[in-house]
Image (spheres, rainbow, N blue to C red):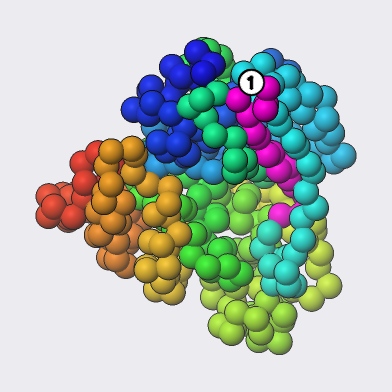
Amino acid sequence: MNEAISKMLACYGCRKAADDPRAMREILQGVVLLGLWRGRFFERAALCGGAALRLLYGLDRFEADLDFTLLSPTPGFVFNRYRDAVVREVQSLGFYIYMTKKTIHRASPLESAFLKTDTLQYALEITAIPETTWRRYTPNPPIRLRIEIDTNPPSGATVESRTCMLPIPFSVRTLAPPELLAMKLAALLTHRYYRQPKGRDWYDLSWCAAHQPKLNLAHLEARLRQTGWMPPKERPAGDGKQPGTEAQRLSGEGELLTDGETQSDGETHSDRESNSTGEGETAVRKGGVLTGAEVLKMAEKVIKLLDIEEARREVLPYLSAPGTAGTEACATAAWSPEFFREAVCRIVMGDVPPAADCGERAGRLASSGAFHPRVAAYAL
């Protein structure tokens, strides 16, 4: 077996890849990041999403995908030059890699309204090279990864550099924790309109509330504006509730994100987007309109509609670690609307300080025995 892979598997308590395929996938994620670093990709982009929280900040769950954001809007961005560096790095460890560019499809007008179209997606399929197949690694089925790159990033983001220790120490540029939390909140405040509950985002929200609770409110506002959200003061006269819009007909709620915040007829998506700079400056129209109180109001609506059981089922495959069978259920046993309300109230939003009694109530939850200490370190 390749010595480098063997040592990395040992860090997960695995003797062979079959002990936990998720560990092997995460090792290959690190190899892909190393290849991107060698190709100088991080001079133009930053890691974000669950992979950043997991690989760089200690999130206690696995992540299947690698999400990136360019540092500034770049229409027509070409990934091919960096792709070659990834292929070389993966092949150097005895793997064969097959990479294809995916076309992003939208299932409905509603889905199109809430999903960014200015992203690139690549699917990676990685198997052991037959002539160097290792005894401890079975090449079938192949390990699949997905890379997504946001080529039109919202404004107001701060980036920082963190060190990945495996396969070798190297530096990765990433969104800072307040921006990662804004990214998670933006996803949660819009997912309810076009897909099943994404338990990973709810898990990450509660983890951030405990470990990285500071929120970049301006960046959250910029992300919401890219989905079509508008604060009340900026809505055209008579915008109000328009039950005849396609989004409202499909959602069946007569509202969009917050009461009366709907798309106005004749206004394009790009008309409402902020002028993204990618340089840490907030360049939104009437910047600072979104308040913590409004975020709490929006979050309450999402929590009321959340299907806890469906969210729990979605996240379970990404929880636990080898040798801790059964802890997945413990990690989400305390999930309830009240649990997530407490998580949200722990977030530092500037104008809305964390609720005074959150710590005490969360302490009672954590001491109730509902959380496994090794898996649910995120517990409030």
Q: Is residue 214 left or right of residue 90?
A: left
Vertical comparison of 361 with 258: above or below:
above
In the image, what residue occupies the spot 83% across and 30% down? 80
Q: From where the camera sits, is residue 238 visible?
A: no
Q: Is residue 13 left or right of residue 26?
A: left
In the image, what residue occupies the spot 44% across and 74% down? 305
Is residue 194 highlighted in magenta?
A: no
Secondary structure of the residue carrying numbered label 1 = helix
Quarter location, residue 100: top right
Q: Quick one: 24 or 50, which is closer to the camera?
A: 24
Q: Is residue 363 left or right of residue 88?
A: left
Q: Residues within 10 Å of mark 1 (few under 14, many from 20)?
A: few
Picture coordinates of residue 70, whole percent (x, y): 71, 34
Q: Which residue is mark 1?
A: 132
Picture coordinates of residue 303, whole percent (x, y): 40, 68
Vertical comparison of 92 with 28: above or below:
above
In the image, what residue occupies the spot 83% across and 72% down? 266
Vertical comparison of 7 with 147: above or below:
above
In the image, what residue occupies the spot 38% across and 22% down? 10
Quarter location, residue 99: top right
Magenta stretch? Answer: 116-133
Q: Quick one: 228 or 194, which is closer to the camera?
A: 194
